[in-house]
Image (cartoon, coloured by chain):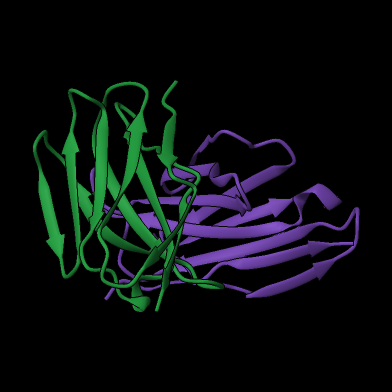
Amino acid sequence: ELKVEQNPLFLSMQEGKNYTIYCNYSTTSDRLYWYRQDPGKSLESLFVLLSNGAVKQEGRLMASLDTKARLSTLHITAAVHDLSATYFCAAGDSGTYKYIFGTGTRLKVLA
Amino acid sequence: DVKVTQSSRYLVKRTGEKVFLECVQDMDHENMFWYRQDPGLGLRLIYFSYDVKMKEKGDIPEGYSVSREKKERFSLILESASTNQTSMYLCASTVGSAETQYFGPGTRLLVL
């Protein structure tokens, strides 16, 4: 059974600092996704990672995938307040249509 | 842009009522999903559908049913609402199995 774990669950960081959110999954997965959720809002797609070594970047966020380690990371560079949100990773359950979500990382960037 | 809409943003129902939540997507997506989101638990899959009239149970289907009579519409039904079904319900759709999901705005349901 595919399980997805994110850490940390909560992250409070100063503006301008760098940090990484980790997403581990328990069994083989052929696809990994990152989403952002602002308070009271729905989820917005950030990145889709479909192969080992895949790296995607958008602004101050960079996501990568290591399928051998069953690990994806979301790296935040020089954080700004606007990045405050909850970030979810989700892994695709191989051979099915299902997406299994982590519990989310609540990020707060302090001015 | 893909648009996924949900019939209500907020709903208040009484225990035992039958509740219908409706989701519509406008991009001819094959796959549609219903999740519930609870603090500390992330998103949990209730049901999904990969074609009209086709459905599969997710991880927490008990107390729920679904209907997909048309490709663009996926309904979640709470047969007899209970207080432990108070939650945020999110609908999502994808064009294919490797694609990202597009989410609706969510329905916050309170069962009294």
Residue B28 image-quadrant placement: bottom left
Q: Is residue B47 above or below residue A75?
A: above
Point out residue B7 in the picture as x, y percentages from the top left corner: 60, 73
Looking at the image, residue B19 sits to the left or right of residue A110; the answer is right
Residue B78, x across and y down, in percent: 74, 51
Give the camera-side residue of B16 and A29: A29
Q: Where residue A110 sits in the image (x, y, percent)? A: 42, 73
Please name the residue shown 40% across and 37% down the image.
A98
Chain for colour green: A
Does A10 sit left or right of A30 as displayed?
right
Residue B11 visible in the snapshot: yes
Residue at coordinates 19% horizontally, 67% vertically from top-left? A60
Quadrant where the image shows the N terminus of chain B: bottom left
Q: Quadrant of residue A4?
A: top left
The tint of chain B in the picture is purple
Q: Is residue A58 left or right of residue B60?
A: left
Residue at the image point whose x is 59% and y is 65% from the top: B22
